[in-house]
Image (cartoon, rainbow, N blue to C red):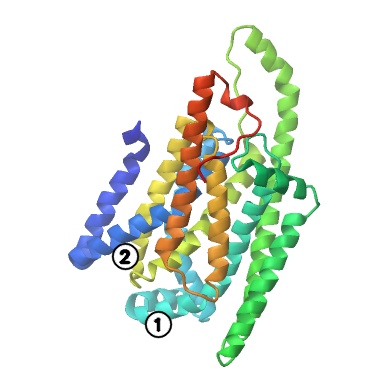
């Protein structure tokens, strides 16, 4: 099972490391290995959230996510995206941007760094909306029960998550603008850039998430119509199968997943410049890491890990909230990538530990975890 799920990741790792040696020797090998570990540590929460969405999709769209989706993730976000943002920010043509990335790596890194505020604002707002919509929803199973019950009550206020996100964005833009002014005003226009990029991230979330939700609701209506037929099949001794997302619903869910993955990859791409400004090594290292994130997503879906460890999804969403905050803070301040990665690891590790303790208590009591309404974590 492990070899089947992670086989392609192992193969890509071997090819990527060999390519690194041929490209730049053993020093390049070390850089690619470090970047791979960096990407995996920063994106484990991405895999958990992806798995929660992917398990709703049918087999066809799961394959699309693992084929076309991986091409977008590896080549689009880890190779093309850094070149595109340089081309846009420096008003260069795509060929000129590629030439710059290969021949003048210091200037290329400088241009990517200059574009960081807009990247961080877009990704930060998108991830913040995911986090807010999660914590304001009333769920049967709660990890931090007292806190989540209070937040669910607040979530009954219409558009609360959008209002909070806009307030956070406004504060971030004003803070950054004041900071730029204090340093000579050379980046005074960055406040406007942050505001516009953040609004673009918010709109992207609302459009893609809204469309996927709309078609998911349509699918639920179809499920209700088929419910009677399924019950008859079950009475006849046939297994009752869960209806999976297909058609338009799955397509927009796929788009949502790709935008989500893009937002998660921002910190990895930017953080990679702390290790190297060589775009080839960056693409190799981050590409290998992205493959493992995809394989881990599939593993979580196939093993039903999210059903067995019910707090993992909670931990991942809290990690998303932390990452959103980190991205917005990095508009003004530099934060070490190790800290960013460890926040996610600690939160997901705590949620996994809480899930294990919960399962042991339920096993001892002979209960059914699916029927538990609320649970207070004793490990966070």
User: Is 110 left, or right, of 235 in this rendering?
Assistant: left
| Location of residue 54 in the rendering, given as x and y in whole percent from the top left corner | 54, 39
In the image shown, does 27 or 131 lie closer to the viewer? Answer: 131
The local secondary structure at tag 2 comes to helix
The answer to whether any part of residue 93 appears in the image is: no
* Dot 1 alpha-carbon crowd within 10 angstroms: few under 14, some 14 to 19, many 20 or more: some
Q: Which of marks 1 and 2 is nearer the N terminus?
A: 1
Q: Which residue lies furthest to the top in this view?
A: 236
Q: Quadrant of the N terminus?
A: top left
> Disc 1 marks which residue?
107
Q: Which residue lies furthest to the bottom in this view?
A: 184
The answer to whether any part of residue 303 appears in the image is: yes
| Location of residue 163 in the rendering, given as x and y in whole percent from the top left corner | 75, 61
> Is 171 drawn above or below residue 178 in the view shown?
above
The local secondary structure at tag 1 comes to helix
> Is 371 drawn above or below residue 26 in the view shown?
above
Mark 1 and mark 2 in contact? Answer it, CB < 8 Å: no
In the image shown, does 103 or 192 lie closer to the viewer? Answer: 192
> Is 315 drawn above or below residue 3 in the view shown?
below
The residue at the point 67 percent across, 78 percent down is 174
Residue 159, image quadrant: bottom right
| Location of residue 268 in the rendering, given as x and y in whole percent from the top left corner | 44, 62
In the image shown, does 270 or 138 lie closer to the viewer? Answer: 138
- Alpha-carbon distance for marks 1 and 2? 17 Å
């Amino acid at each position: 099972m492990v070899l089947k799920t992670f086989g392609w990741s192992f193969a890509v790792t071997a090819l990527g490391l060999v390519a690194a040696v041929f490209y730049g020797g053993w020093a390049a090998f070390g850089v690619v290995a470090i970047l791979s570990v960096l990407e995996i540590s920063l994106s484990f929460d991405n895999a958990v959230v992806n798995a929660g969405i992917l398990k709703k999709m049918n087999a066809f769209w799961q394959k699309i996510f693992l084929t076309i989706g991986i091409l977008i993730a590896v080549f689009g976000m880890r190779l093309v995206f850094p070149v595109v943002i340089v081309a846009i920010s420096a008003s260069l043509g795509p060929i000129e941007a590629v030439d710059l990335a290969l021949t003048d790596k210091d200037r290329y890194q400088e241009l990517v760094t200059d574009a960081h505020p807009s990247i961080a604002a877009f990704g930060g707002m998108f991830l913040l909306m995911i986090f807010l919509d999660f914590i304001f929803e009333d769920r049967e199973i709660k990890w931090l029960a007292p806190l989540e019950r209070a937040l669910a009550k607040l979530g009954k206020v219409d558009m609360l998550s959008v209002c909070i996100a806009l307030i956070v964005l406004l504060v971030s833009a004003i803070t950054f603008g004041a900071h730029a002014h204090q340093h000579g005003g050379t980046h005074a226009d960055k406040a406007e850039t942050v505001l516009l990029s953040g609004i673009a991230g918010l709109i992207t979330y609302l459009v893609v998430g809204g469309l996927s939700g709309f078609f998911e609701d349509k699918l639920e209506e179809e499920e209700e119509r088929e419910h009677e037929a399924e019950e008859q099949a079950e009475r006849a001794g046939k297994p009752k199968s869960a209806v999976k997302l297909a058609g338009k619903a799955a397509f927009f869910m796929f788009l949502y997943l790709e935008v989500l993955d893009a937002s998660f990859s921002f910190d990895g791409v930017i953080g990679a410049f702390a290790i190297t400004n060589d775009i080839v090594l960056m693409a190799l290292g981050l590409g290998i890491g992205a493959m493992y994130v995809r394989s881990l997503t599939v593993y979580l879906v196939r093993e039903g890990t999210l059903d067995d460890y019910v707090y993992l999804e909670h931990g991942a969403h809290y990690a998303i909230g932390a990452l959103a905050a980190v991205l917005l803070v990095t508009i003004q301040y530099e934060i070490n990538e190790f800290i960013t990665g460890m926040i996610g690891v600690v939160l997901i590790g705590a949620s996994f530990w809480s899930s294990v303790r919960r399962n042991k208590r339920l096993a001892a009591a002979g209960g059914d975890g699916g029927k538990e309404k609320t649970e207070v974590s004793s490990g966070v």
